[in-house]
Amino acid sequence: MESAAPNTAPQVSVIMPAYMTAHLIAGALDSVLDQSFRNFEIVVVNDGSPDTAELENVLTPYRDKIVYLKQENKRAAGARNNAIGHAKGEFLAFLDSDDAWFPGHLAAQMKLFERDPALDLVYCDGVMETPESSHKFMDRCPSQGPATFEALVVERCQIPVSTVVARKVALARACFFDETLPRCDDYDMWLRAAFWGAKIGYSCNVQARFSVNRPGALSASNLNMVEAYWRILEKAAETLPLNNEQKSIVQQRASKIRAHYLLEEGKTRLDEGRVSEAVTSFSEANTHLQSAKLSLILFGLKTAPAATSKLVAFAKRIRGVAVH
């Protein structure tokens, strides 16, 4: 089942993967259709979603306004690549199907390209919403200075995928999304695009709303996200022709994130009562972190491993151990 959008020569193709978001996708689509900038098409990819019947029912009123594609589940990267393969626009605008744009988003992003034609990719700020609270993405993940390859490696600049508008040719230079990655394929994409010369710009305007910790969402597991970040940095070190300075930055950051991963792994193992395995993870993490607090915790775990009350106290205390 496929339906064609009425705009046969759009400037922008909106890329929208859909997986288990039948109850949310109408909000995402409405936010696109409400844009003040009108020269776009919408490409929705059903990524083998178990809620296909419900999804297609929700999409019925939008059928003449979208290009609808179905595929076997290939995760977000595969869905995005499929959509890009059918996209007619010079520019690609990414929007996850559980997020939404404010009405001036596309107009503002395209204005950035008008002001600086050398730009290849732009992004902006958005509001992250949970059932309990909301906050700006850049309040917790700020962007500071030029968004270069090195800035993305050390997270001096962080890019929320649902605000990105990019030239298709810039992503093609980096061979689009890596479908072998289980998560964080967007971070990997921006990293490689920047390495291969994409000029990235951004604004601090709030132009989108993000759904956080949706059940089943890839961002729901902190441990998995940290591991994915570390693995992507290792992949960059192994596969990109980095100069010595870049390689040093990537390797140092990968080591730091691996230590963070081991710390999170240790917390999980301790919560599960696997004390000896927690000690192994914490010990390996601390070879990089050199944390006095973590050293004290390790001493306590080794000397009083069976004391439940002590373990609970330790578990609470290590919540404050930081990577930085």
Image: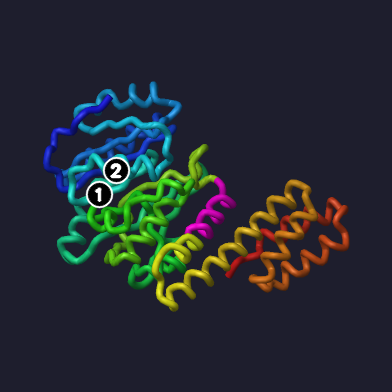
Q: Residues within 10 Å of mark 2 (few under 14, many from 20)?
A: many
User: Which residue is pictured at 24% across the width and 46% down the height?
Assistant: 103
In depth, the one of 195 and 108 nearer the eye is 195
| Amino acid residing under circle 2 | Ile
**Residue 225 is a magenta residue:** yes
Amino acid type, callout 1: Leu
The percent coordinates of residue 261 (x first, y second) are 61, 58
From the top left corner, tell me how far across and down residue 67 is, in percent: 23, 33
Report the span colored magenta. Answer: 221-232
Residue 160 percent coordinates (x, y): 38, 54
Q: Is residue 91 magenta?
A: no
Q: Quadrant of the N terminus?
A: top left
Indicate the secondary structure of the residue bearing disc 2. Answer: strand
Answer yes or no: do the residues labelled 1 and 2 have beta carbons within 8 Å? yes
Query: 31 or 303, which lies in front?
Result: 303
Q: Name the residue tied to disc 1.
A: 92
The quarter of the picture where residue 96 lies is: top left
Crowding at dot 1, Cα within 10 Å, few <14 / some 14-19 / many 20+, comes out as many
Q: Residue at x 62, y 66 (%)?
A: 322
How far separated are the C-alphas under marks 1 and 2?
Answer: 7 Å
Q: Residue placed at 73% from the left, 65% from the top?
A: 283
Callout count? 2
Residue situated in front as seen by the camera: 252 or 305: 252
For mark 2, what is the residue?
15
Q: Quadrant of the C terminus?
A: bottom right
Tell me which corner region of the image, top left, top right, bottom left or bottom right, holds residue 267: bottom right
At x 39%, y 25%, the residue is 52
